Image (cartoon, helix red, strand yellow):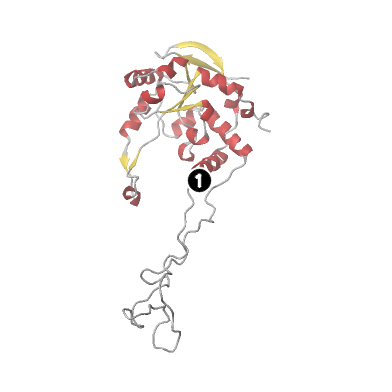
Amino acid sequence: MAKTIQVLDLEGNTVRKIELPEVFDAPPRPDVIQRAVLASISSRFHRHGVDPMAGKRNTAYSRGPGMHLARVPRRRGSSYPEASAGAFAPMTVGGRLAHPPLVEKRVRELINRKERRLALRSAIALTSELEAVKKRGHLVDAKIKALPIVCVDDVEDIALSREARLALTKLGVGPDMTRVLNGKRVRSGAGKKRGRKYKTPRGPLIIVGKMGPIAKAARNLGVDVVSVSNLGVEDLAPGTHPGRLAIWSESALNILKTLNWLSPEGSQ
């Protein structure tokens, strides 16, 4: 039996009830979700390596044993006496790397198409589980008794941040927006010196039928916006943790119903 959910207007009032697509009945598979998210992250990695001749452009050679010297390659020439500067070897200054990174190394994690689709179905279904959303750390208003939050399509046309903040607060995600805006902190460890000084929690996700002004209106509120056609597992389970607090527009749910591959029968 299909689940029904209330459709809310921008004031938080119920205007009608609709049936949720079959995909919201998919079984939870956090293991497959984790694989799909890691595969998505690794697809952005760049191959890198070192120059094959790095540390080798010198005149160094080893004299071998019997010279009362370590068998370290040493530079030749008038400015480098034979018993002085070592070179070429990994433990010498300016020498080659012992085990340098190679461009041949496989840096991308691959995943089967059916597994990726199973992960997406499972991640979508877990957005409707209140316990999974709370376990992920989201703060949900007490008036919300069932998930997902479905809103009329007017939410896609909101152009001002103050209007977006007011509407999202009335929809019940105000506490979670506050959690995000107050949750920015300095990262522990050496990463703070490498271009990632701060860590910020991930807030609610608005899923729309087509991108509109809401994308700019909500970007400074700790809220992400994505169209249902570009929806990925990483959007629904950042950091491999499923159960993201999602707000669906009514048109996004209607588009979701037309995607046959999201149903178990259509994925075969």
Q: Secondary structure at mark 1?
A: helix
Most foreground residue, 13 or 164: 164
In which quadrant is the C terminus drawn?
Answer: top right
Residue 232 seen anywhere in this rendered image of the structure:
yes
Q: Is residue 139 above or below residue 199?
A: above
Residue depicted at x 34% and y 77%: 85
Quadrant showing the N terminus: top right
Query: Where is residue 187 shown, x and y percent of the image?
Result: 33, 45
Which residue is found at the position 50% from the left and 45% from the top? 42
The residue lying toward the viewer, choosing from 60 and 18, is: 60
Instruction: State which quadrant residue 206 falls in.
Output: top left
Q: Hey, which residue is sitting farthest front in the picture?
A: 78
Q: Is residue 39 left or right of residue 182?
A: right
Q: Amino acid at mark 1?
A: Ser
Residue in the image at 60% along x and 32% along y? 27
Residue 117 at what x, y percent from top left? 60, 34
From this view, report whether residue 80 is shown above or below residue 56.
Answer: below
Q: Does the rendering let one see residue 152? A: no
Find residue 202 and report its horizontal and vertical position in percent: 40, 34
x 59%, y 21%: residue: 257
| Residue marked by disc 1 | 42
How packed mark 1 is, by other alpha carbons closer than 10 Å (few <14, some 14-19, many 20 or more), is some
Q: Is residue 76 above or below residue 172?
A: below
